[in-house]
Amino acid sequence: MKLTKEEEILLKEIENGEFVSQKDEVNKYIKFAKDFRNSENVLIRINENDFNKLKIKANEKGISYQDIIQVLIHEYVNGKVEI
C-alpha cells in the first residue's frame, strides 16, 4: 500500500517516538495554567480581530484563551519564545 507524504511523515514520527498527539499538547497547556495558582490579575487591551482569532484557536485546542495567554507569557519570560 502506498502512503501519502503526510502519512509517511506521521509514521516516521511515531516510529521514532517523536509524535505528540493534540491531546498531549492540550494537557501541556492545562498543566501550565494550573501552575499559575499564585498569579496576578492583569488588564490588557487587545485588538478585537486578534482577540476573536485567539478565542477561535483556543476553542480548536479545547482550552481557554486565558490559558493560551498565560502559556505564551510563561514561554516568553523563560526564553522559549522570541519577539
Image: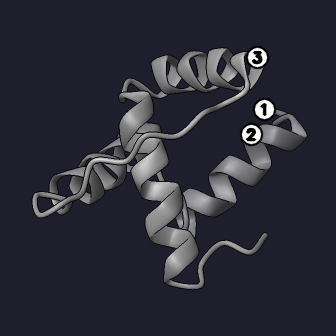
Residue 62 location (% of width, % of height): 38, 23
Helix, strand or loop for disc 2:
helix
Element carrying mark 3: helix
Relative height, residue 37 to residue 45 (above, below): below
- The Cα atoms of the two marked residues, 3 and 1, are separated by 45 Å
Q: Secondary structure at mark 1?
A: loop
* Quadrant where the image shows the C terminus: bottom right
Give the amino acid at mark 1.
Answer: Met
Q: Residue at x 67, y 48 (%)?
A: 10
Q: Residue at x 60, y 33 (%)?
A: 45
Residue 82 in the image: x percent, y percent?
74, 75
Can see residue 9? yes
Instruction: Mark yes or no: residue 17 visible.
Output: no
Question: Left or right of 21: which side holds 4?
Answer: right
Of residues 75 and 25, which is closer to you in this image?
Answer: 75
| Left or right of 81, for residue 1 | right
User: Depth-wise, is mark 3 or mark 2 nearer the camera?
Assistant: 3
Residue drawn at point x = 81 percent, y = 40 percent: 6
Query: Which residue is label 2 attached to?
Result: 7
Disc 1 crowd rating (10 Å Cα; few below 14, some 14-19, many 20+) is few
Where does residue 56 sit, x and y in percent of width and height?
59, 15
Tell which circle, 1 or 2, labels the residue nearer the N-terminal end. Answer: 1
Instruction: Name the kind of residue labelled 3 in the image.
Output: Asn
Residue that carries the numbered disc 1 in the rendered image: 1
77 above or below 17?
below
Which quadrant of the view contains residue 14? Answer: bottom right
Q: Is residue 22 above or below residue 8?
A: above
Identified at 46% across, 43% down, the residue is 68
Front one among 14 and 77:
77
Name the quadrant of the N terminus: top right
Whether pointer 3 and pointer 1 mark residues with C-beta atoms closer than 8 Å, the reply is no
Mark drawn on residue 49: 3
